[in-house]
Image: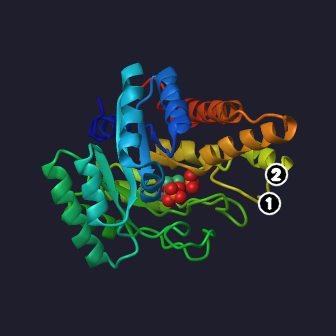
Amino acid sequence: MLVTSKEMFKKSIEEKFAIGAFNINNMEFVQAILDAAAEEDSPVILQTSASAIKYARIPYLRKMIEAGLEEHDIPVVLHLDHGPDFETCKMCVDNGYTSVMFDGSKYDFEENVRLTKEVVDYAHSKGAVVEAELGKLAGVEDDVNVADSDAMYTDPEQAKEFVERTGCDSLAIAIGTSHGAYKFKGDAKLRFDILEKIKALIPNTPIVLHGASTVIQEYVEMCNKYGGNMPGAKGVPDEMLHEASLRGVSKINVDTDLRLAMTGGIRKIFTENPEVFDPRKYMGVGRDYIKDTVKHKMKDVFGCSGKA
Ligand code: G3H
Ligand code: 13P
Ligand code: ZN
């Protein structure tokens, strides 16, 4: 059965670990992530953006996850990532999603409160939970792939007011991460001081970190070696993510690392075995790399292995 994130977040706060939220777009991603979570005995969040829904279509996404739940007995959340408006959130809740994000970070504070509250009221009436966002990450919300200059960090006092007024179940904050494969120009830097202030004011609100891929160098190098062009791709080091998991971050979002694992694998096979034209031969390798990546994060970084 799909579950909401309520229980797993409560446990994550009590026992100081984070849960991985992985973006899915097709069957190979779903299988790799669920197989990894089952082997690690970990709770897991599968999330789909609006563009993933457009690509794969809701019935396919839902039924693939249902198939995974027939095979594995672990707590799984189906979550809408970056819901742009009430209608998209409602559509997902009505289609069995147990959790939705309403991303109102592009609006001013009052409008973000008003729109988030509308989604919260609807989702709660149907038994689903809501993630909201306050503060602005550079990246997907901006169409800018550089984190440091324009990032607007979350204000701790505003975060408290926002959670109280909206009744949201979890809060995505901006402390220096950004979406995509190019997160930092110089050294990676996260504002743990801001996280600490937020946790002091709202200790029981699960905190979410977006744009938290490591941008695994092994896969960047694989992409570049076999015909790709991603110079200088760089993300949040494992050690920082581990620290975040110990300091009260409950949900860590990962998309880019899985894309890199799949793409690296496919590029390698295409280059080394140009005679291959059976998609299972290259998609299968990508699926294995995704599974390895998810297991590594659960076991070595987020601390959620054995927490199912
Ligand atoms: O944070 C955004 C995710 O990486 C999803 O990206 O809209 O290209 O599916 P997408
Ligand atoms: P990355 O691009 O760092 O994987 O972030 C993914 C994300 O935040 C999805 O919402
Ligand atoms: Zn995100």
Earlier along the polypeptide chain: callout 2 or callout 1?
2
What secondary structure is marked by label 1?
Answer: loop
What secondary structure is marked by label 2?
Answer: helix
Instruction: Tell me the tag on residue 96.
Output: none
Residue 168 location, x and y as percent? 25, 57
Q: Amino acid at mark 1?
A: Pro
Q: Quadrant of residue 295?
A: top right
2 vs 1, front mark? 2
Question: Real-space Cα distance between discs 2 and 1?
Answer: 8 Å
Give neighbour class at mark 1: few <14, some 14-19, many 20+ (Cα, 10 Å). Answer: few
Circle 2 sits on which residue? Answer: 224
Tell me which residue sits at (46%, 48%) in the image.
Answer: 56
Please say which color scheme the image uses. Answer: rainbow
With respect to residue 39, does 168 lie above or below?
below
Q: Amino acid at mark 2?
A: Asn
Left or right, 97 with reference to 106 = left
Q: Nearer the viewer, residue 131 or 242?
A: 131
- Are dots 2 and 1 in contact, CB under 8 Å? yes
Tell me which residue sits at (76%, 58%) in the image.
Answer: 230
With respect to residue 108, does 79 lie above or below?
above
Query: How many numbered marks have been drawn onto this rendered protein structure?
Result: 2
Tell me which residue sits at (29%, 51%) in the image.
Answer: 92
Circle 1 sits on which residue? Answer: 231
**Which quarter of the rendered picture does the C terminus lie within?**
top left
Regarding residue 210, the answer to whether it shows in the image is: no
Q: Nearer the viewer, residue 173 or 276?
A: 276
Residue 26 location, x and y as percent? 51, 42
Left or right, 146 with reference to 79 = right
